[in-house]
Image (cartoon, rainbow, N blue to C red):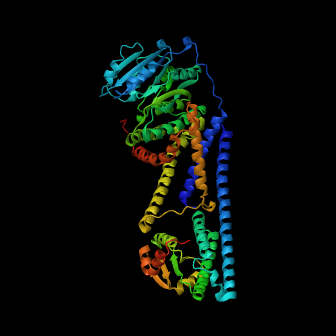
Amino acid sequence: MPWTKYLLAFLITAFIFATAIIANNFFNTKRIAEIRSIEEGISIDILSLETQFDLLQEQSCKNISEDSVLSRELDTLARKLSFAEAQLGADNEEVLRLKRHYSLLEIKDLLLMQKVSEKCALEPIFLLYFYSNEKGTCTDCKRQGYVLTELSKEYPQLRIYSFDYNLDLSAVETLVSLQNVSSDLPALVINDSLYTGFQSVEDIQAILPALVKTATSTPEVQ
Amino acid sequence: MDITQIVMYIVLFLSLYFEVFLLITFFERSESKEHNTLVDEDSLPTVAVIVPCFNEETTVAGTLRSLLALSYPSQKLQIIAVNDGSTDGTREVLEAFRDHEQIQILNKENGGKHTAMNAALAHTQADVLGCLDADSFVEPDALIQIIRHFEDSEVAAVTPSIKVYEARGLIQTLQKAEYGLAIFVRNVFARMDSLFITPGPFSFFRRSVINEVGPWQHGHSTEDLEMCLRLQRLHKKVTNEPNAIVYTKTPKTLPELFKQRLRWTYGFLRNAVDYQKLFLNPKYGTLGMLVLPMSLFSLFGAVFLFSALIWNVLVLFAREFVRFQTVGLTAPTIQFDMFFINTSSILTITIALVVLTLVLMGLGKRLARDSYISLDMPIYLVLYGFITPLWLTAALYKAIANTGVRWR
């Protein structure tokens, strides 16, 4: 029996396996680091904007538009976080920690933008989306996600904030209770009104006629 | 990690291990012996090529003509065409060759390929016996390439390299790549004394060995597999000559291919039961410890891997369908970001396995004097996984239920 060959083949196969696993771990660590760095960046940006706004009050309005850089960054962060969640698993501690941080940043951005729009007479549309990734708890959440992705592409003035209903974070729990969101998911809060169950693109357009109007009257958003 | 992932890792590890083992063996003894084909005619053994025919009216004439064109002394080459109760015009086609002094024609009632082989056996005293299916054709130097192996008195049987004859259409293109891989695998198995099939197209046997081990048997419709396993059980040496090129007609349609592969796989499983003593038996070396167990395992592994592949594709389609139903056709957002490249270890290992399979396939093609790379290889890799589970699962079921399979 050519035992040396059996052993050599085993070592080569084990090497290929180990390389694949180590490389995957390496890239996942890099991903986590990248997400963390984006979160830190956003965190600083929010703080800076808050501070700037507090300092200058109304005068700072000229620097702020409905489609602020922040929301775009939050969107990138959301996509990266959701990819990391798929790669590492929804139960991964690091992913959960980043997700909690992300939800906090969303709430901070929401509060800041509410304050800004009030003072600067802006009219952004706030859409809060509560979903669940737990099996069997929200059969329509995937479809609702597609609808919101599509809407966010079409209407940049729409500010969508999505929250994992089951995320163990007191700030999200407070938001859930403030908005009276039940476990009947998906749930949408559009400009302070709660809508439970799946809402199609047309449903949301019907709720927000202003949205359609703005979109058609602004053919090319830069 | 869930159970599916664990099974996936085990299947991938064993598959990769086997391919690495084959590659090491190939490079370990890659020095190909350049044989001198200008051999002394007087020392050549007498050879009988048996051509069993059952309803082969369209191809058998070409088969016989390719045999007559073999560069082998005519006085030492006997061709025995056996009409195994054909119901088409095979008999008339064969009769046209009756006057040829090298060709002998036998007519018998239909009884299956093994009975045709055995009928011919009684009509020859040749030193070496071979078979050529009536849908196959040989290169002129194929026989001489094979016969020189019999100079080694240890050699009991020699197998050739089999290529697809005039591959047309998708199904035959797939098989072209698959046969390239088989050429490599057969050659490496031979280097490890682990061949377990002496294929119908142009395998040759030493007459004295056939006398010793007995005639061909039904072998669950795979007499070529049964004969080789029988030789291996008795520790007879079976080798391979990659330069002996045989072309065979292959199924053109999916149902035809399904039928053929069902027979092959069913035959392997049933013979595996009959010859179970060879499995995991150190007395049979690499054949017993690695090649036979891995060949058996690969059937289950392939069903698992291919089912996982089909499942993933279905999930993807279902997701896109739901998206389409929900928001209609949407333009995809195309933006490149390294972040989103899938680096999962299962995917990376699968890619390594695919690349290695391509390498083995390329080496097989090179062994049989083709170029390393051809278009059929990527087509094979993309599509083969979707059709293989059809016959693998059907054969597993039939083998367990012991239902038997039909030749045609």
- Residue at 54% across, 23% down: B146
- Residue A37, horizontal then vertical, whole percent: 68, 70
Whether residue B236 is visible to the viewer of this picture, yes or no, is no
Q: Nearer the viewer, residue B378 or B349?
A: B378
- Residue B402, horizontal then vertical, whole percent: 39, 43
Q: Nearer the viewer, residue A94 or A175?
A: A175
Image mark count: 0
Q: Quadrant of the N terminus of chain B?
A: bottom right
**Looking at the picture, does residue A162 appear above or below residue B292?**
below
- Residue A153, horizontal then vertical, whole percent: 51, 70
- Residue at 59% across, 41% down: B359
Q: Nearer the viewer, residue A27 or B185?
A: A27
**Looking at the picture, does residue B111 appear above or below residue A190?**
above
Residue A140 falls left or right of residue B22: left
Residue A202 falls left or right of residue A178: left
- Residue B335, horizontal then vertical, whole percent: 58, 62
Whether residue A50 is visible to the viewer of this picture, yes or no, is yes
Q: Nearer the viewer, residue B278 or B8?
A: B8
Q: Quadrant of the C terminus of chain B?
A: top left
Which picture quadrant has residue A26? bottom right
